[in-house]
Image (cartoon, rainbow, N blue to C red):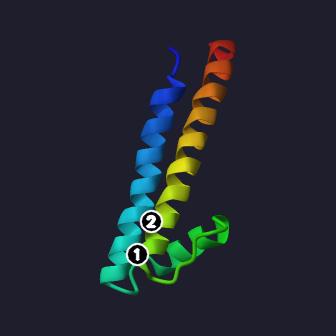
């Protein structure tokens, strides 16, 4: 069975982008919530700062969508290479 790189890329982008978006919005509503998680994300993504502004939440979400999508495509590509050789 082969994985679709496009489908896994889209699913990963939605999942990781949604995680950053929901964590960021929750942090805006309840300041201590996910603060350490957002600080970790801000150390990875160069333009994202955990400064509790809606603009920063959108920037972090954009980075996460791109990162998650690329990661999903690479994962599917590697799986499609390795899986037939291990069967």
Residue drawn at 48 percent across, 33 percent down:
8
Residue under circle 2? 58
Residue drawn at 36 percent across, 81 percent down:
28
Q: Give left or right: position of 67 versus 11.
A: right
In the depicted view, which residue is nearer to us: 25 or 84? 25
Q: Give left or right: position of 3 versus 25.
A: right
Q: Are marks 2 and 1 in contact (CB under 8 Å)?
A: yes
- Residue 55 in the image: state x and y as whole percent: 45, 73
Which residue is situated farthest in the front direction here? 55
Depicted 71 relative to depicted 59: above or below: above
Residue drawn at 55 percent across, 57 percent down:
63
Location of residue 78 by image quarter: top right
Secondary structure of the residue carrying numbered label 2: helix
- Residue 1 in the image: state x and y as whole percent: 50, 14
In the depicted view, which residue is nearer to us: 55 or 72? 55
Residue 54 shows which numbered tag?
Answer: 1
Which residue is situated farthest in the left direction here? 29
Label 1 neighbour load within 10 Å: few <14, some 14-19, many 20+: few
Residue 67 shows which numbered tag?
Answer: none
Residue drawn at 60 percent across, 72 percent down:
42
- Residue 36 in the image: state x and y as whole percent: 52, 79
- Residue 20 in the image: state x and y as whole percent: 45, 63
- Quarter of the image where the C terminus is located: top right
Secondary structure of the residue carrying numbered label 1: helix
In the depicted view, which residue is nearer to us: 43 or 36? 43
Q: How many marks?
A: 2
Q: Give left or right: position of 52 versus 77.
A: left
The residues bearing labels 2 and 1 have C-alpha atoms spaced at a distance of 6 Å
């Amino acid at each position: 069975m082969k994985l679709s790189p496009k489908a896994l890329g889209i699913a990963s982008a939605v999942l990781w982008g949604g995680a950053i978006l929901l964590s960021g919005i929750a942090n805006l509503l309840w300041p201590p919530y996910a603060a350490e998680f957002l600080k970790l994300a801000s150390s990875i993504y160069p333009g994202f700062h955990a400064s509790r502004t809606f603009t920063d939440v959108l920037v972090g979400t954009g980075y996460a969508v791109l990162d998650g999508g690329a990661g999903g495509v690479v994962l599917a590509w590697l799986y499609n290479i390795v899986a037939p050789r291990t069967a």
